[in-house]
Amino acid sequence: MTGRLAQLWRYPVKSMLGERLPAGDVGPAGVAGDRRLALRHRGTGRVASAKHPRLWRGLLALHATGAAPGPVRITLADGRAVSSVDPDVDDVLSRVLDAPVTLIDRPPTGAVLDRADPDAVLAAGLTAEVPVDASPLGAAAPGTFFDFAPVHLVTTATLARVAAELPAGTVEAVRYRPNLVLDVDVDGFAENDWVGRELRIGPELVLRVLAPTPRCAVPTLAHGPLPRQGAALRVPARLNRVAPLPQLGPQPCVGAYAQVVRSGRVVQGSTVEVG
């Protein structure tokens, strides 16, 4: 089956809003410049992630842009901006997030982030104390800030299937933070069946699909001007609760994780072939 690359995204700082790109290079560490920086809590040593929304949902009010090797520009909710190379960047972000943080470009040894139980967050609310698991970083791409794999993709069909269950009839791709949005003639949640298959995007890039992507509470949160939307998690929890990996129980899943078999440059509209 064939289709096209509908959208290409990168997120220069982990858990901050990112930027849509007209074109980009994709290599072993994903889209060039993706998740190149993160925030580390000076007290706990944990990498900050909106997967623990009680502490870090404010990250999704910040907007990060910029290609390597240049600095990353972080625009704050009030419109002010700070650069990743500014001498006071840590102080500015610490004040905005009300937590002592340091901007880092490599994960510390044994780096982990906290992932709140998404069902518990839905039931108890964003500010409630809920069960939290410590998740290691860099399993598929050592030395990176990726939770599991360097590429996350979702089909327009899956987004449309979720949107069909929502009163507004739409759901924004950015809620699920994909790198690639693929417009392929398939049914919703077809990504579940792509595990182990290869995708060719453009003349060069080849990906191998690793697993469906289990969803945390992040899609439910406000993303900049986008309001909270609990149904962005409730709908896949009802329609597509599957076990993404043998060691995990059923999880609400949207999209899939992939690794890069052959690097390449892609542009919006590139041909997609599912092997």
Image: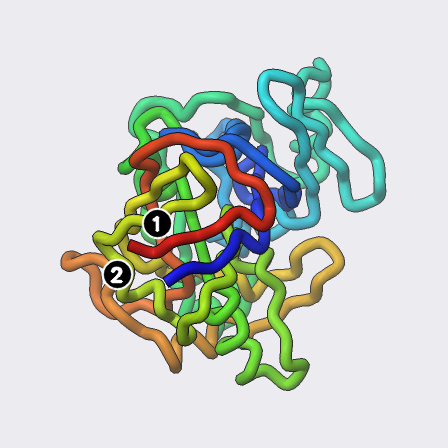
Looking at numbered disc 2 in the image, what kind of residue is underneath it? Pro
- Secondary element type, mark 1: strand
Could you tell me residue 112's position as x and y percent? 35, 37
Q: Nearer the viewer, mark 1 or mark 2?
A: 1
Could you tell me residue 221's position as x and y percent? 59, 61
Residue 168's place in the image compared with 140, above or below, is: below
**Farthest left residue in view:** 246
Q: Around disc 2, counting alpha carbons within 10 Å, would you say few (fewer than 14), some (14 to 19), or many (20 or more)?
A: many
Looking at numbered disc 1 in the image, what kind of residue is underneath it? Leu
| Residue appearing at x 46%, y 70% in the figure | 158
Could you tell me residue 251's position as x and y percent? 31, 67
Q: Around disc 1, counting alpha carbons within 10 Å, would you say few (fewer than 14), some (14 to 19), or many (20 or more)?
A: many
Question: Between disc 1 and disc 2, whose residue precedes?
Answer: 1
Residue 186's place in the image compared with 143, above or below, is: below
Give the residue at mark 1. 199
Give the residue at mark 2. 244
Left or right of 181? Residue 134 is left
Could you tell me residue 32's position as x and y percent? 51, 29
